[in-house]
Every structure is written in structure tokens, then in C-alpha cells.
Image: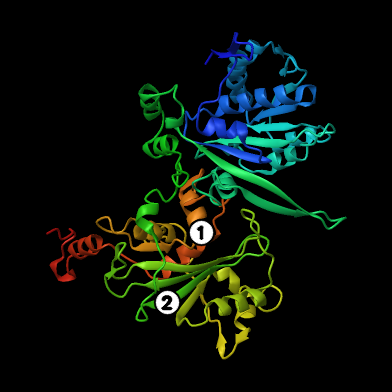
């Protein structure tokens, strides 16, 4: 990337690094406190943050103090090696033992890794004007990153900020997507987050933004790199890497999910369609309530044709405080009242809930407490859901039932979701396989809506016609034939 620039006196001087037009230039110029820079592989993310540091340290000199973090030591090596190519061009000196660059103007950039979440505690008391998190999606939980935000302070009045990079996939995919992508999927929109000073009552807003970076934005990589990526991973992951598509998840449990196929623009549900609700209870973790309609006949929405018998999720209530996997801690009566309020005008045929909600450990069960609430002459009614997760002893499991509906028949799913059901769209496609039981979901994930949708599917079992016909053709021979063979047409 070395080139030259003409100075004011007309002489040419070497340029250590120059931002490419597009996302890299936007990153360098962005004044936001928190920036997530990423998307596709090969989008110039590492060069972008190293260049951001060059500009920052050149402007603030010895008051520029930076920390660049990666999850693992081995990942850190490549970032350091890239800095060795760029930084010496301006006379920066690297101190190997401290893993730190000292810039000509006195600024310092230290490299570190956080293999354990508790490692972030060792930085408490430090002060940095810039913190860089490389590949944020490799962190399963945002807590260590959040702890590092407390180090962003400057006694010299330098504007402080955090810069993060990342690609789709990885153990932290869900929280990264929820914080940076979901609020503005196309990026370049500033999100303001208010915070209240508990002593003064003053409201301070912190801003953050997602700057999408794709392979096409990097003029130094082309077809050869695309071919290399295609050799490295499975088709789903390669697509996510190339397109920066955060709706595509490597290793997804529901691998037939497609935003194009399964998400619908909201429309008025025909009165003749049966409606019902499903629920997964939660207190410190989120609860989830889903409202479903059953297509009475093939129905043309003008967007697509919904097959007869398909389930349409037209409304949801996710009991989260806005942070991934953190509940509202509402009591059952208030939740029940909230459900009734949302059902005003609906005719709900039935409701299913996790059987655990009927447990009477110390007084009325959760289901009873919700059902005790009245709104006018209406009360909630619940039935225990069939909560089988995986197939056992010949009985179909809930995940298989849900997969079957998502797959559908002849490219027509039997389960759809309104685009307003944002938490379903955020969490269900990101569900991962349990590493020790691949036929089940990893329950460490945010699985509350997936469980609730499973209850809905199990309340309306669906068998593909081809499977039903095959079952008819492979029946045991009548007893009078004394045959021990199976009838095959």
C-alpha cells in the first residue's frame, strides 16, 4: 500500500498507509464512541483499525494510548505482523516483550488477548483513548468487552472510543448481530443509547454505528481470494463470509431457514383462520409468547402463496429487557394481563405452554396465576404442551416437527413469520447444535422462542404428503396371510 503524497512545499513524501475509498474512509472519519466495522471476509478490517490508530496517534501525540485485543494469542500474531509492515514506515518502534508500539509522537499501542472472560479484570484502572476489538464474534459473551469500555477515559481530554471488527458466524454471532446489525441492517445509521447519571440525574447519550465492509470494498483482493474462501468452509459459511450476510449462520440447527422464504410482510389474517398461542415461561431469562394462525386454504398474499395448513406467526411478545437473554422479571399475573391485552379483538382457539408451568412447588402454578387474571369477561386458558425435543421410541420429536414445517414441500414452507416478529428472526435462525447431542439444540443459546415455536408445531403435527403416502404403502400384511414380510407396491 506504500505510495507518495505531495506536501505543501511541493515535495513528495512516502505515505505509510492510505484509507481506501468507502468503508475504510468512513471508519477513519467516524466520530462515534463505538463503531462495529465488518461483514464479509477480506473487507480490509485489520488494515482499517491499524490505519485508524495511525490517524488517532498522529493527531493526539503522547496522549493517544491504545489497546488492541483479540480472543486468542495465535490470532494476535497476524495482526502484529501486519502492523510490522505499516508502522515502521513512520518511524514507530515495536517493543517485543511488552507487545507495544511507541509512535514518533509518543503515542502507545499495546496488543493483548483475552482467552478467559476474567482476563478483562486485569485492565481495570487502565486508561485508554482507543480500544480495538478484533473479531468480536469470537467472544461468546460481550461481558469482557463491556468491561474494557470502562478503561476508555483520558485526563488530557482526548475523545475516546472503541472500534470492533468481525464477520458473521462464531460463538458470539448472536450478541454481535443483536447489538450492531439488527438496529440498522444496512448500516451507516447512528444509534443513540441513553445512560442516566445516578448521582446527578443527567442523561448522557453514547452513540454507536455499524459500518458494513464487504470483499468488493477491498481493491487489493479479487477473484483469487474468492476462490480461496470457497475452498475453506462449507457452503453456508462461505456465503456468509463473501456476502457479509448476518442471517446466515454456520452450523445452524435450522439449516433450511431462509429469510426470503419464511418472512412475510404483515397482512390482515382472514377471520376464518384458526388462531392459537404458545408460550415458554421465563423470569430472570426471557419468556416468549407467540401467536399463530393456521392457513385455511392456499392463500395469495401478493408476495407469495401460503399453503393450506401452514402456520403463520403473526405476533410475538418477548420478555427481554433489551439485552440478549436477560428477562423482564415480571410476575405471572402481570404477564397474563399483558397477554390478554395483546389478544383484544382476537379469537384464540387454545393456548399451549411448557408443562413445567403447571408445577405447584409452593402455591399456585405459573399457569394458574396467569389464568386467574381477567380482562372484561376474558381469561387465559392453557394446556400442557408436548415438550418432546427429539424423536424417541417411534414418537416424533419437536425439533423434527419444526424442521419439517420449515422445509415444507416443493419449495413452499409450512411455517412463516411476520417481519414484525423480530426476536424470532433474531434468535431462531442462530440456534446451534448441542456439541454432545447433535440432534438437539444447544441450550446455552437464547433458545426461548425456539422452544415456544416447538410447542406450537407439536400442537399441529404436519406430515409431508409424500411421507403420508409412503406410510400407507408400507403397512404390515394382514394377520390372516401369516406373512412376515412387508407389503411393497
Helix or strand or loop: what does disc 1 sit on? helix
- The residue closer to the viewer here, 487 or 428, is 428
Lateral position of residue 489 relative to residue 286, left or right:
left
- Which numbered tag is attached to residue 301? none
Q: Residues within 10 Å of mark 2 (few under 14, many from 20)?
A: many
- Return the x and y of residue 335 as percentages of the image width and height: 63, 73
Q: Residues within 10 Å of mark 1 (few under 14, many from 20)?
A: some
- The residue closer to the viewer here, 115 or 144, is 144
- Quadrant (top left/top right/bottom left/bottom right) for the C terminus: bottom left
- The colour mode here is rainbow
Lateral position of residue 414 relative to residue 246, left or right:
left
Lateral position of residue 462 relative to residue 431, left or right:
left
Of the two numbered discs 1 and 2 in the rendering, the one whose residue sits closer to the viewer: 1
Q: Which residue is mark 1?
A: 422
- Which numbered tag is attached to residue 275? 2
- Return the x and y of residue 165 as percentages of the image width and height: 58, 34
- Return the x and y of residue 469 as percentages of the image width and height: 20, 64
Q: Evaluate whether residue 135 shows in this view.
A: no
Q: Toward which corner of the image does residue 310 lie, by quadrant?
A: bottom left
Spot the residue most to the front.
9
Spot the residue most to the top.
11
Q: Residue drawn at (56%, 21%), measured in percent from left and top?
A: 18
Amino acid at each position: 500500500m506504500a505510495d507518495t503524497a505531495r506536501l505543501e512545499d511541493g515535495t513528495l513524501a512516502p505515505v505509510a498507509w492510505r484509507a481506501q475509498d468507502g468503508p475504510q474512509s468512513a471508519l477513519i472519519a467516524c466520530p462515534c464512541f463505538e463503531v462495529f466495522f465488518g461483514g464479509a471476509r477480506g473487507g480490509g478490517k485489520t488494515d482499517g483499525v491499524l490505519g485508524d490508530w495511525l490517524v488517532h496517534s498522529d493527531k493526539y501525540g503522547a496522549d493517544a494510548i491504545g489497546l488492541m485485543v483479540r480472543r486468542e494469542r495465535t490470532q494476535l500474531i497476524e495482526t502484529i505482523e501486519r502492523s510490522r509492515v505499516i508502522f515502521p514506515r513512520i518511524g514507530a518502534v515495536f517493543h517485543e516483550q511488552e507487545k507495544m508500539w511507541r509512535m514518533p509522537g509518543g503515542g502507545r499501542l499495546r496488543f493483548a488477548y483475552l482467552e478467559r472472560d476474567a482476563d478483562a479484570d486485569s485492565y481495570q484502572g487502565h486508561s485508554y483513548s482507543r480500544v480495538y476489538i478484533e473479531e468480536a464474534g469470537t467472544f461468546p459473551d460481550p461481558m469482557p468487552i463491556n468491561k474494557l469500555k470502562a478503561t476508555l477515559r483520558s485526563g488530557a481530554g482526548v475523545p475516546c472510543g472503541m472500534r470492533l471488527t468481525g464477520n458473521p458466524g462464531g460463538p458470539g454471532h448472536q450478541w454481535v448481530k443483536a447489538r450492531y446489525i439488527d438496529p440498522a441492517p444496512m448500516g451507516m445509521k447512528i444509534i443513540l443509547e441513553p445512560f442516566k447519571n445516578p448521582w446527578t440525574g443527567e442523561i448522557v447519550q453514547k452513540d454507536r454505528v455499524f459500518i458494513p465492509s464487504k470483499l468488493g470494498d477491498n481493491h487489493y483482493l479479487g477473484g483469487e481470494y474468492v476462490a480461496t474462501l470457497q475452498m475453506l468452509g462449507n457452503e453456508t459459511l462461505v456465503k456468509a463470509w463473501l456476502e457479509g450476510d448476518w442471517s446466515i449462520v454456520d452450523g445452524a440447527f435450522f439449516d433450511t431457514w431462509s429469510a426470503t422464504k419464511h418472512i412475510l410482510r404483515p397482512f390482515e389474517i382472514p377471520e376464518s383462520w384458526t388462531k392459537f398461542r404458545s408460550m415458554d415461561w421465563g423470569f430472570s431469562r426471557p419468556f416468549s409468547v407467540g401467536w399463530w394462525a393456521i392457513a385455511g386454504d392456499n392463500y395469495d398474499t401478493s408476495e407469495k402463496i401460503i399453503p393450506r395448513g401452514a402456520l403463520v406467526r403473526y405476533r410475538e411478545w418477548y420478555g427481554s429487557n433489551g439485552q440478549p437473554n436477560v428477562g423482564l422479571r415480571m410476575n405471572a399475573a402481570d404477564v397474563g394481563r399483558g397477554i390478554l391485552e395483546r389478544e383484544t379483538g382476537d379469537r384464540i382457539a387454545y393456548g399451549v405452554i411448557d408443562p413445567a408451568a403447571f408445577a405447584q412447588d409452593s402455591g399456585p402454578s405459573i399457569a394458574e396465576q396467569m389464568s386467574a387474571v381477567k380482562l372484561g369477561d376474558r381469561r387465559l386458558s392453557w394446556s400442557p404442551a408436548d415438550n418432546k425435543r427429539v424423536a424417541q421410541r417411534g414418537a416424533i420429536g419437536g425439533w423434527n416437527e419444526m424442521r419439517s414445517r420449515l422445509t415444507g414441500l416443493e419449495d413452499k414452507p409450512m411455517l412463516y413469520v411476520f417481519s414484525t416478529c423480530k426476536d424470532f428472526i433474531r434468535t431462531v435462525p442462530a440456534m446451534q447444535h448441542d456439541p454432545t447431542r447433535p440432534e438437539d439444540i444447544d441450550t446455552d443459546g437464547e433458545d426461548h422462542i425456539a422452544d415456544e415455536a416447538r410447542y406450537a408445531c407439536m400442537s399441529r403435527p404436519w406430515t409431508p404428503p409424500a411421507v403420508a403416502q409412503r406410510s400407507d404403502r408400507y403397512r404390515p400384511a394382514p394377520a390372516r396371510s401369516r406373512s412376515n414380510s412387508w407389503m411393497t407396491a
